[in-house]
Amino acid sequence: MKSILALWAIVAAAPLMAQEDSIEANKDTLIFTTVVENPITSIKNQNNSGTCWCYSSLAFLESEVLKKHPEMKDIDLCESFVVNKTYLDRADRNIRTHGDASFSQGGSFYDVIYCMTNYGLAPEGVMPYPETLYGDSLYNFSSFFPPMEAYVEAISKSEAKRINPSWRNSVQGMLDDYFGKCPEQFEYEGKTYTPQSFVEFLGLNADDYVSLTSYTHHPFYQPFILEIQDNWRWASSYNLPLDEFMRVMEEGIRNGYTFAWGADVSEEGFSRRKGKHLSVATVPIPQKGPSVGSDQSRWTGEPQGAKISESDQEGELEITQELRQLGYDNWETTDDHGMQIYGIAKDQNGKEYFMMKNSWGEMGPYKGLWYVSKPYVAYKTMNILINKNAVPKDIRKKLGI
């Protein structure tokens, strides 16, 4: 998932939090009331880095810890540990494939699960070491990443007959200089852990988590490798029909689970600029005109096959499996950003939205939280990472999990 950086404007008289519905609504304001809200940890800030995949996955795992251990309200997992381990592995994959597997700042939810399984996890505060030059909470990759990227490319595209394995030491040195060295053991609340034993302490089990998606170019109820560049580990996602995909998300939230949400956030309806619906994501209806779905759609940008929902008070498209597939096939739906969905809310018109935790800091009227319409989730979700126990039993049976 690629980094999405936003410039925020200060919004006068912004809507209050969901529970404060005493403010008189007007046509330019959405007032949200929480329907169900599952525990999340504090808002983080990925700043100038393409590490949303790490922040969102760890946010999800932190909520998983809270579900098992409600008393661990301050749990905060270290992004630097995961990113350090992951970038070295990604450099290795890039070089082994002669540069065909991309090397970039982005990643996938599975990168965090892989790290947890093979390297462990660490709490915030154990990295970086005091002698490092950069802090752990606000990344700025503008100077750090390009030289490392150029170095990896030089190795992967080399015409040498042999590759000197010392390249790994060089890349690891770059990572350690920026993030600090990954500790082999550390203190947490008065006890000593290794990264692996810390995972055991948290009660996390990688086998509990599954990636789900919904596309028609592969059979339903079977796993397939989602064809996106940042899925460089070639992880599989289970494929569900759209109605069942949405049902998993809906019922999962209502039954006390959260999930990591990968989606396209470059759409016009994903509002991160000043306006009446700041920090709200919807799928606005394109301008109507003659010959919709024919050649005119190439000029107007209206999706071919779009169905307009006449009953939707906010004027959103009715999302179909075909429309969703078309967006993916035409590169209109792109792998942009990883977030966490943790609740459901409704506006003053009774329309329901998913509640989303972002990693852009405490920005916007909801201090880093967003409201995402169900049509937007149906249309622009790339995949989700969720506890398999959140999947309804009949769907789990179809998937064989």
Image (tube, helix red, strand yellow):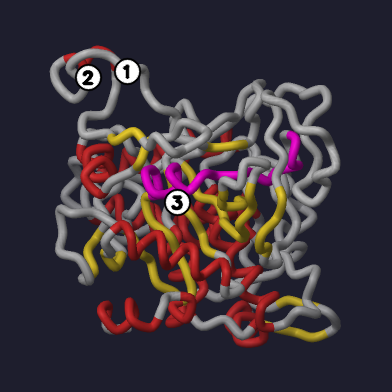
Sequence-wise, which precedes: disc 1 or disc 3?
Answer: 3
Alpha carbons under labels 1 and 3: distance apart: 30 Å
Quick check: marks 2 and 3 in contact, CB under 8 Å?
no
Residue 392 magenta-highlighted: no
**Which one is in front, 88 or 40?**
40
The three-letter code of the residue at mark 2 reads: Ser
**Which one is in front, 215 or 108?**
215
Rendered image quadrant of residue 134: top right
In this image, 254 relative to 249: left or right?
right
Residue 376 magenta-highlighted: yes
Quick check: marks 1 and 3 in contact, CB under 8 Å?
no
Residue 162 visible in image: yes
Instruction: Give the residue pinned by disc 1.
Output: 288
Residue lying furthest front in this view? 311
Q: Residue at x 40, y 72 (%)?
A: 210
Sequence-wise, which precedes: disc 2 or disc 1?
Answer: 1
Q: Residue at x 56, y 66 (%)?
A: 253
Alpha carbons under labels 2 and 1: distance apart: 10 Å
Element marked by disc 3? strand
Q: Residue at x 52, y 35 (%)?
A: 313
Q: Which residues are magenta?
A: 365-381
Q: Residue at x 33, y 54 (%)?
A: 231
Q: Where is the N terminus found, in terms of image quarters?
A: top left
The three-letter code of the residue at mark 3 reads: Gly
Q: Where is the C terminus found, in terms of image quarters?
A: bottom left
Question: Is residue 81 placed above or below 146 in the rendered structure?
Answer: below
Label ID, residue 262: 3
